[in-house]
Amino acid sequence: MSAKIRIGVIFGGRSAEHEVSLVSALSVINALDKEKYEVIPIGIAPDGRWLSAPNAVQLLKEHHPSAHLPEKILLPDPSRRALVSLSSGAASADTIDVIFPLVHGTFGEDGTLQGLLELADLPYVGPGVLGSAAGMDKVVAKQLFMQEGIPVAPYVAFLSSEFSASRKKILATLEKKLRYPMFVKPANLGSSVGISKAHNRKELLPAIELAMQYDRKILVEKSIESAAGGAREIELAVLGNDDPKASVPGEIVPSNEFYDYDAKYVDGKSETVIPAKLPAAVSKLLRQLAVRGFKALDLSGMARVDFLVTRKTNKIYINEVNTIPGFTSISMYPKLWAATGVPFPALLDRLVQLALERHAAKSKLKTAYQPKKDWYKE
């Protein structure tokens, strides 16, 4: 019998999506096949401290983990591949074969955690540094989508410092180019945290101020609800490395005016329709665009790709990607794959396999070059 794969599941983190991450982690940990995997829970507290224990998720939920456990971290040292205790400085027995990162948002989904895992030479689930960073930044993602000819909703982006210096000019530009209503978002965040819908100038200013609490870069998008009878929120799940595949599309019917944090996680009243009721040609095009968007950002492993589709004309706009999508009981990514014929445990197996395959391919690349002459020693 072959040895179990030791899989480190990282969750929590210094992010506004900390609580969502805990729920995703618990769902994944419970669903991983214990005959195949030995799970090592790795929690990151809201202040950034790392800890590891079988009950790490529950300890983070209780908001006082440091009183119970010694801190452990991953070092950017490819010779270790293990959690290291800060108290002793010696490597623990927690050697790791692969990492499943479930830190949503800042410091987890933006390429920073992926950079640490690259330095540590550890295989990990999901996109690499570039794809993670590009997917996290909604403005950069839109620019890359536009370059690939994938339609996006009209938008304006600016920095908080620019808004402070030129408030009247930026407000005039927004109202002229986009008109009301419009969505105001932090460029680098997920789970609809910090997002507002502004119907007039009175609502626009507080919306911008709220978004600036979470990011220095602000994205303001035109709402397309007035176009062709309004827009439907359609999501697809993408799985794969160099040859990714897209799931069937699913529709979100939010309980609030838009799919905000409460509608996603709190009130439990939002509905999902899987597969979405769309013409076959529209569903096919959405699957093609989801894969194109995935490739445009150089993603790998997994991503959920979100679209807006107008009701009367079925015009498609790509909205954003989530490179570490939710894995809670209500999350669309696993539900979409289940509807496409890939149940949750099999989906997790495939994600781990993709991580190991990508790492094996990268390991074949040269990381050193021998010049003809040792000029640097002179």
Image (cartoon, rainbow, N blue to C red):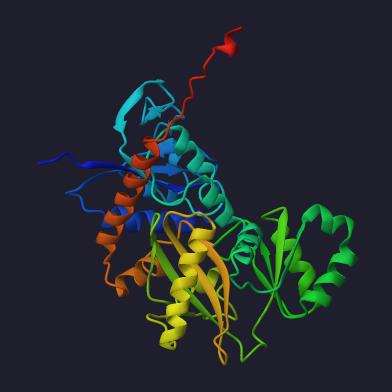
Indicate whether 181 appears above or below 47.
below
- Where residue 304 appears, x then y in whole percent? 46, 65
State the residue at coordinates (60%, 69%).
149
State the residue at coordinates (30%, 60%).
347
- Where residue 90 appears, x then y in whole percent? 37, 21
Between 145 and 266, which is closer to the camera in this rendering? Answer: 145
Between 25 and 4, which is closer to the camera in this rendering? Answer: 4
Indicate whether 317 appears above or below 115.
below
Give the mark count. 0
Quadrant hosting residue 47? top right
Between 358 and 161, which is closer to the camera in this rendering? Answer: 358
- Residue situated furthest top in the rendering: 378
Q: Is residue 353 left or right of residue 120?
A: left
Between 370 and 254, which is closer to the camera in this rendering? Answer: 370
Indicate whether 366 appears above or below 134.
above
Query: Image quadrant for the C terminus?
Result: top right
Indicate whether 87 appears above or below 303.
above
Whether residue 353 can be seen here = yes
- Residue situated furthest left in the rendering: 1
State the residue at coordinates (41%, 70%).
332
- Where residue 208 appears, x then y in whole percent? 75, 64
Quadrant hosting residue 136? bottom right
Whether residue 270 can be seen here = no
- Where residue 229 appears, x then y in whole percent? 61, 92
Query: Image quadrant for the N terminus?
Result: top left
